[in-house]
């Protein structure tokens, strides 16, 4: 039986269908979770997809943070449940304090909608174990508020705790610091994605679900989704699709 | 109960990059204005709170400002009473 993974739909979510499709491809059974429901319906992991939840009014992600489903997501995360936030989902997680830091308006003041390259700093997490360390992954970004910010002391603490899991990289594979055109939003220390201290909640600005099939120009996002699906299957005590296929 | 009206002014904390402020500053030359610097763009939220007294009303606004209207990692806020207090009961005279 495929592992059930929840995809939360807020009013204004617009990447939920892409995420559901990509989860299908990754061998999971996607479960749609509406923002007004208080139950996660027993899913083994949750994805907060991209979009503009509640119109991004006030600050991106903040209104969504107080929705009934987010109470359930916070409790699930507190119990060690796997949660991945993509783009707007990352903003929601940051506003909820489930991952460290904040996402500021892009330093260019422009909406960034283009392909970028990111590299995984760690391949020992529930979200990255199917990846190769520091191999550039091509996938799109599409956001106006994606500039990762934390103060210097907090950034140092994140690095020490190895909580930076993705960084923007340039054509040479080096970290794309603010000012480098390969850094789409001015994110400090080229940070594209982070993980919480307990390793079960992660967020990233780029869209792996939009790079999940060759026809989309890149399949590099699949490694992230496949990592999550496998980890969720393991958490649910099931055989993962990959392990099943290997037999 | 009495109604109290407040404004909550939310601004980027010192040291936080504020590209909006920078863009505004950059446009000043087009207006022929000089000598203006350190432009910071924030947000102002006005609201009315019904409470027994001003201290109770302010406590509600403070919670709202801290948990919803600002993100303490990146923004500071201050609370400003505006418009004075008005008694809800007299305002709604004839009801209930």
Image (cartoon, coloured by chain):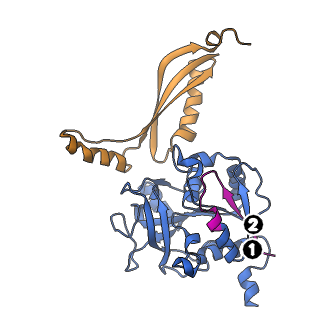
Residue A2 highlighted magenta (yes or no) = yes
On screen, residue B91 above or below B10: above
Chain on which label 2 sits: A
Contact, mark 2 vs mark 1 (Cβ under 8 Å): yes
Q: Position of residue A81 (x, y in %)?
A: 71, 62
Image colour for chain A is: blue
Of callouts 2 and 1, the N-terminal one: 2
Whole-Å distance between the Cαs marked 2 and 1?
7 Å
- Pinpoint residue A38: horizontal percent, then vertical percent: 76, 50
What residue is shown with label 1? A233
Q: Would you place residue B49 above or below residue A94 in this image?
A: above
The magenta segment is A1-19
In this picture, residue A244 sits left or right of residue B4: right
Q: Quadrant of residue A107?
A: bottom left
- Mark yes or no: residue A2 visible: yes
In depth, the one of A230 and B43 nearer the eye is B43
State the residue at coordinates (74%, 87%).
A245
Residue placed furthest toward the right: A1
**Nearest the eye: A85 or A133:** A85
Q: Which residue is mark 2?
A: A44
In which quadrant will I find the N terminus of chain B? top right
In the structure shown, which secondary structural element does the residue marked by tag 1 occupy? helix
Q: Quadrant of residue A228?
A: bottom right
Residue under the image location 57 percent in, 21 percent down: B55
């Amino acid at each position: 039986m495929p592992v059930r993974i929840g995809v939360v739909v807020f009013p204004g979510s617009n990447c939920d269908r892409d995420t559901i499709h990509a989860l299908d491809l990754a061998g999971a059974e996607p479960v749609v979770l509406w923002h007004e429901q208080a139950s996660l319906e027993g899913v083994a992991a949750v994805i907060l997809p991209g979009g503009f939840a509640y119109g991004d009014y006030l600050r991106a992600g903040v209104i969504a943070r107080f929705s009934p489903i987010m109470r359930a997501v916070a409790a699930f995360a507190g119990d060690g449940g796997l949660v991945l936030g993509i783009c707007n989902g990352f903003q929601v997680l940051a506003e909820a304090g489930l991952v460290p830091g904040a996402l500021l308006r892009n330093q260019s003041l422009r909406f960034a909608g283009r392909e970028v390259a990111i590299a995984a700093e760690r391949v020992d997490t529930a979200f990255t174990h199917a990846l190769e360390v520091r191999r550039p992954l091509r996938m799109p970004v599409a956001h106006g508020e994606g500039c990762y910010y934390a103060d210097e002391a907090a950034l140092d603490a994140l690095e020490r705790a190895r909580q930076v899991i993705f960084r923007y990289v340039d054509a040479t594979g080096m970290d794309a610091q603010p000012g480098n055109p390969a850094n789409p939003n001015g994110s400090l220390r080229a940070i594209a994605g982070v993980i919480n201290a307990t390793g079960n909640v992660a967020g990233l600005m780029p869209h792996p679900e939009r790079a999940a099939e060759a026809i989309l120009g890149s399949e590099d996002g699949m490694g992230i989704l496949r990592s999550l699906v496998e980890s969720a299957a393991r958490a649910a005590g099931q055989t993962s699709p990959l392990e099943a296929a290997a037999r | 109960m009495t109604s109290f009206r407040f404004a909550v002014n939310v601004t980027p904390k010192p040291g936080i990059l504020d590209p909006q402020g920078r863009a505004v500053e950059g446009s000043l030359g087009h207006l022929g204005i000089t000598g203006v610097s350190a432009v910071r763009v924030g947000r102002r939220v006005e609201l009315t709170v019904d409470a027994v007294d001003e201290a109770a009303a302010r406590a509600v606004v403070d919670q709202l400002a801290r948990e919803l209207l600002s993100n303490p990692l990146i923004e500071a806020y201050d609370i400003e009473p505006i418009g004075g207090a008005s008694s809800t009961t007299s305002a709604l005279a004839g009801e209930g």
